[in-house]
Amino acid sequence: MLRKKSLTLTAEEEAGAEFTPTQILFRALNQRNYRLAIVLIILAIIVPAAIFMAIVIHYNITDLSRGQVISFLAVGGIISFFIVAFIFSKFLAENFTMTFHNSCIAVQSSNTISNFDFVHLESFQIWNNSDYSKLIIRHDNQVIKYHVGFANLIKTTPILAAEDTLDIVFSPQLGFTKHIANQKGINIITYTT
């Protein structure tokens, strides 16, 4: 006869149980690439209008209706959006692995490795479920941002599927408090010390 394994740990098993790190895998823009992305967005707004005006002036086109002008600019805007989204996701975004250990957060990409210990951690914030999704770490009077939404403009996926995924890591026993806010459809989860 088979017995079901108990899902609760006894006190002896709990004392011997090791902490298993939690990981989040995501594509994001670091702060330097985010600034470059803002410049590309501004260019994506200006360039289609400038090209349209150059064509109109060069060929002396004077008989365009308002609807035709709007249609040309709309098509140019849509094309430039897809070009910018492709550039963001293929050339500016990096794959990151954020590992939550019992005493620190380790963030690793192909270029960098950063460790943020809980002793100097002021807050950890997750902006979830939007084009503005990002992870914000306030550590030792510095603010480090990972812009997830800008790296995934075509397909927006939440950073955390469930709001309580990191509650084990940032538990009240370790001195963290959790705050959840919803601002304009953006779910903001904040863990503070």
Image: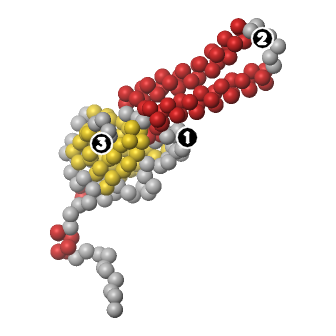
State the SS at label 1: loop
> Could you tell me which residue is drawn at 25 percent across and 34 percent down?
141
Amino acid type at circle 2 is Ile
**Quarter occupied by residue 143:** top left
Q: Residues within 10 Å of mark 3 (few under 14, many from 20)?
A: some
Question: Closer to the N terminus: mark 3 or mark 2?
Answer: 2
Residue that appears at 28% across and 51% down: 100
Q: Nearer the viewer, residue 126 or 172?
A: 126
Q: Circle 1 is placed at which residue position?
A: 154
Q: Is residue 125 above or below residue 163?
A: above
Tag 3 residue: 108
For residue 36, say whether it is visible.
yes
Sequence-first disc among 3 and 1: 3
- Image position, residue 14 (x, y; %): 21, 70
Is 14 above or below relative to 186? below
Return the mark for residue 61.
2
